[in-house]
Image: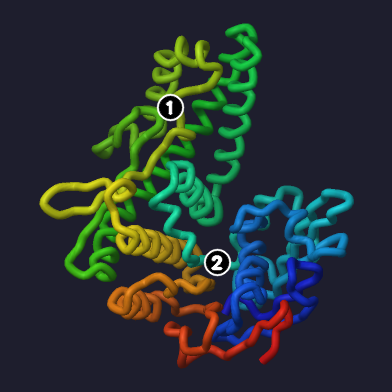
Amino acid sequence: MPLQRLELTGFRNLRDAALELPPEGVALIGRNAQGKSNLLEAIYYLEILRSFRRARDAELVRTGEGHFRVAAELDGRRDGPRTVAAAFDRRARRKKVTLDGQETPRLGDAIGHLGAVLFTPDDVRLLSDAPAERRRFLDVVLSVNRPGYLPALQRFRHALSQRNAALRDASDPATVRAWDPELVEAGSCVALERSSWIRGATSRFRELYSDVAGESSATMRYVSGITGSEPALPGSEAADPEALARAFAKALEVSWPHDLRRGATRVGPHRDEVAFSILGAGERAMRTFGSAGEKRTAAFVLRLLEAETVRARRGAGALFLLDDVFAELDEVRSARVTKLLEYFADGQIVVAAPRESDVRFGSERVARWKLEGGSIGR
């Protein structure tokens, strides 16, 4: 049980509250716009220290209030902090994060302590939107589960930003190229971790996709923004940091005339893609040819793989947060999804639904809380 107590102050439309969560979890029942998703957002904020809806921190502060604060008390038997808290002062525009009451020197030190995995209907964007959406998914999964990934990602983004700024300003070439070593070093680490995760999860993705879809099958592959293709074999750039760094440095050399003309860096992990394909008589690109059901199935499987990654890191089940995930699934897929969730969710769960009859998952194990106008009742 990762989450024992949740304290809310000034967060969106939710009334200030101190909530004791049962070990098994809760079902949040309420009509639309009553605060169910806001409560899930508050919990998940403590996992990634930002809104999963991509709202700015100032937008999370309740109307008429000057700040919000969200705090969680975690199971004392776990390694790591016992309490995690985050607050944002709208007037000062300052975020403060504490672990066991001590402010963290870096925000990255405080992410990932809940071990939460969030499922929402918007997850279909992982398959239908532009490649940046899939890179964002990988960055969240790896930042909270792979030590060293977040610092490397931050270094890469900084070097890329500075290099692009120098290109746009038509700076001296030496000024632009001064950022290449950091770009190559950090970018190679990012690309290597992304490639490793995709490769390690591909077989499991196909298996779980078939479990949900029945006879249909699908796969995924990593497409490098450095080499422009999928490195295929162990010993290639996909598995060798030094080889990947050399390939990146060479790609920057080849791309240099283009970068000068366009004022932007053309090659690197910021151009990575994860390509999903539907398997059958041939391969069909899921983003282009996949049905809504096929895309939702693939997105759901990605969340299950994320949960397996959390379990591998923590040695315990993830905290499952489910926001009306059955709303757009047919009965057959809903039944298969429910079966898989019951198998995977051996930890605490928080599930939101508009009606009690819609709580298809966890119906026998979780308490019921009702939400109305931001007020939580039992």
**Is residue 277 visible to us here?**
yes
Instruction: Name the residue rendered at 62%, 10% in the picture.
Output: 170
Q: State the CA–CA distance, disc 1 to disc 2.
A: 32 Å
Mark 2, residues whose alpha carbon is within 10 Å: few (<14), some, or many (≥20)? many
Relative to 135, is 296 on the left or the right? left
Residue type at mark 1? Ala
Residue type at numbered disc 2:
Gly
Look at the image and tell me in which quarter the C terminus lies.
bottom right
Dividing the picture into quadrants, the one containing residue 271 is top left
Q: Position of residue 264 (x, y in %)?
A: 53, 21
Who's the residue at 39% across and 81% down the image? 342
Left or right side of 156 for 297: left
**Residue 111 in view, yes or no:** no
Q: In this view, does 168 lie above or below 221?
A: above
**Where does residue 189 sit, x and y in percent of width and height?**
48, 37
**In the rendered view, would you say 270 is above or below 96?**
above
Element under disc 2: loop
What is the x, y in percent for residue 232? Answer: 25, 37
Q: Nearer the viewer, residue 280 or 44?
A: 280
Q: Name the residue under label 2.
A: 115
Image x and y of residue 71, in percent: 74, 70
Label placed on residue 245 = 1
Q: How many labels does the image show?
A: 2
- Name the one closer to the observer, 2 or 209: 209
